[in-house]
Image (tube, helix red, strand yellow):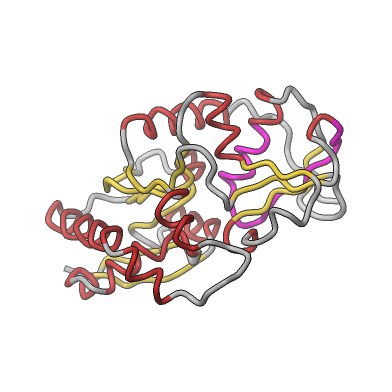
């Protein structure tokens, strides 16, 4: 069997998965690349990868794709790495700049603005704006650098009563059951050894890696998260305003 091309997110939240894969025999059955979330989605959509942990919004462009493992990148409550940052309260913003690295987080921000906060704002892809979406490691330590900070996973839970799934392991073609089982076991091993991984990370005074990886990121893809994905994809289809590129 040819090696399975796997695209994984190059953020701290995915390190437990990488840790497990690199310490499992399944590593010899894959070709692993590390990419930003939008690139993971691109590779799967354009058949440059067979399996990837992709932003769930990409499922709209992958009608035959399947979520194939028991694990995801999700949150039950605050995720602490997906935000709207602003110097104004949400009820006063008129423009929002999106983050080029994740369609899912951009969609989530727009859904919350439209359906939760009941705000109509102009959405930009670049330039100055009243507020901006930012995700991933670039947000670490920034929660005190703006007057107003909105954790999107927390507000999704307040809006829906559900957890959120930012990314899931998705295959764009059938993969052998034995491979998926071995892959799942490797992911589980990495999650079980997060404490060892955390000890290897460079210390930061402005961010708690242990709290983030052990508490904020919820890695189990359970029934509530499946319901959240279905609801999110339905709401994504209601977004009818294309971003403006000034």
Give the residue at x 85% y 48%: 129
Q: Position of residue 123 (x, y in %)?
A: 78, 41
Q: Position of residue 194 (x, y in %)?
A: 34, 63
Give the residue at x 27% y 70%: 30
Above or below for 14 versus 200:
above
What quarter of the picture does the N terminus occupy?
bottom left
Occupied quadrant, residue 14: bottom left
Occupied quadrant, residue 5: bottom left
Give the residue at x 23% y 50%: 174
Occupied quadrant, residue 191: bottom left
> Which residue lies most toward the front here?
205
Q: Decide whether residue 106 is among the magenta residues.
A: yes
Above or below for 210 versus 122:
below
Q: How many marks?
A: 0
Q: Position of residue 222 (x, y in %)?
A: 31, 36
Residue range of the region highlighted in magenta in the rendering: 92-111
Q: Position of residue 82 (x, y in %)?
A: 60, 49
> Which residue lies most toward the left here?
178
Q: Would you say 177 lies left or right of 77 here?
A: left
Above or below for 96 versus 228:
below
Above or below for 114 versus 219:
above
Give the residue at x 43% y 57%: 213
**71 and 190: which one is in front?**
190
Q: Decide whether residue 173 is among the magenta residues.
A: no
């Amino acid at each position: 069997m040819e090696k399975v091309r796997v695209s994984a997110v190059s953020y701290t939240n995915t390190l437990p998965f990488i840790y497990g894969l690199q310490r499992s025999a399944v590593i010899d059955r894959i070709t692993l690349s590390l990419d930003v979330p939008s690139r993971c989605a691109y590779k799967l959509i354009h058949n440059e990868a067979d399996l990837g942990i992709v932003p769930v919004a990409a499922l709209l462009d992958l009608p035959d794709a399947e979520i194939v493992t028991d694990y995801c990148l999700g949150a039950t409550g605050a995720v602490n790495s997906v935000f709207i940052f602003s110097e104004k309260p949400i009820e006063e913003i008129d423009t929002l700049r999106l983050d080029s690295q994740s369609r899912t987080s951009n969609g989530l921000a727009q859904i919350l603005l439209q359906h939760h906060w009941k705000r109509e704002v102009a959405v930009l892809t670049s330039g100055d704006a009243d507020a901006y979406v930012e995700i991933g490691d670039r947000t670490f330590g920034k929660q005190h650098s703006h007057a107003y900070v909105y954790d999107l996973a927390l507000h999704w839970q307040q809006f829906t009563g559900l957890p959120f799934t930012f990314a899931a392991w998705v295959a764009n073609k059938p993969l052998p059951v034995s491979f998926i089982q071995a892959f799942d076991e490797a992911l589980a091993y990495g999650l079980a050894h997060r404490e060892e991984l955390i000890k290897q990370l460079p210390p930061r005074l402005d961010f708690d890696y242990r709290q983030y990886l052990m508490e904020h990121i919820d890695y189990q893809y359970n029934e509530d998260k499946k319901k959240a994905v279905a609801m999110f994809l339905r709401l994504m289809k209601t977004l009818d305003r294309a971003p403006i590129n000034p």
